[in-house]
Structures are given as C-alpha cells and as structure tokens.
Amino acid sequence: MKDEEAIANDLVHVTKELGCHVIGVATTHTEATVLARQTFPDLILSDIKLADGSSGLDAVLEIRRVGEVPVICVTGSPERLRGRTDLSTFFVLPKPYRDDALKATIALVLSCRSDDSDDLRDTRLKSDF
C-alpha cells in the first residue's frame, strides 16, 4: 500500500529488481484489503497514511487477521509507531530511504519468512476475511 505515486513506483521498481512479483499497488484501505483477499501477499510495503486519509496500519492489521504476513512500513513519521505493541512485528524503513536499504530490508524479511512459509500458507487456507 502506498499513497505517494513516485515512491510507490520506486518501491515497485526496486522490488521487481529483486525478482519479486508485485501483485498490485493500493492507495486506500479498501483497495488494500480487497487486493489482499484476491491474492494474499507474501510481503506488504505500507505507509502510515494512505491517499484518501485512511490508515495503512489499520488496513495491514485487518489483513493480518487472516494470517501472518510480513510488513515493511515505509514512513516519514517512524516516531508515530513507537509504543504500539500491535506493530511489534513490523519492520520500519524511514523515508527518505536509499534503494540499497530497501533491498536489504526486503531480502531480510523474505529470508526470515521462508522458514515459516508452509505454516503461513496452511493458516491462510483455513482462514477468510
């Protein structure tokens, strides 16, 4: 999920450079949850505030009720995440970021996730929104 078009395009470009398939870009809470229902992602890149003023965090938390999915929160306001225990498993990448930092974060998150991917897929198959 991303609200700023230029940053969204960069996120897509860098993610594809890593060989990942991008299933879509959502600019609102509704778009994000609908997209996740259609094709449950292996990774979510999200900002705190989306284009329509809705919360990217609320959208991610709703999506994660179905099953654990890693989240990288790309934000210019990382201080807004401090103290939120419901976000303790989120990775935070402050804006502005460097592409190499984004690549390293994505690689780290996906490598950690690969150990648990079978368990996560089983959980997804048993769940629904």
Image (tube, rainbow, N blue to C red):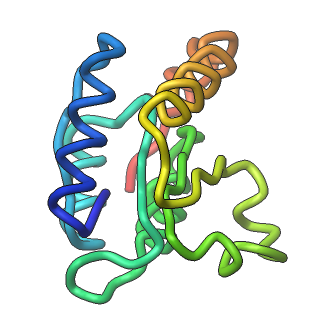
Q: How many marks?
A: 0
- Name above or below for residue 71 compared with residue 51: above
In what quadrant of the picture does the C terminus appear? bottom left
Image-based side of 40 in relation to 64, left or right: left
Please state which of residues 75 and 87 is positioned toward the viewer in this rendering.
Answer: 75
Residue 105 to residue 119: above or below: below
The relative height of residue 85 versus residue 109 in the rendered view (above or below) is: below
The picture quadrant where one finds residue 113 is top right
Q: x, y (%) of residue 65?
A: 55, 56
Residue 59 location (% of width, % of height): 41, 68
- Image point 49% across, 28% down: which residue? 100
Residue in view at x 54 percent, y 47 percent: 72
Query: In x, y percent, where is residue 116?
Result: 67, 17
Residue closest to the far bottom: 53
Which residue occupies the foreground of this view, 65 or 44?
44
In the picture, which quadrant includes the N terminus? Answer: bottom left
Compare residues 117 and 89 and report the one nearer the observer: 89
What residue appears at the point 58 percent right and 12 percent down from the top-left corner?
Answer: 118
**Relative to 55, residue 25 above or below:** above
Please tell me in which quadrant of the rendered image residue 51 appears.
bottom left
- Coordinates of residue 93 in the picture (x, y in percent): 58, 51
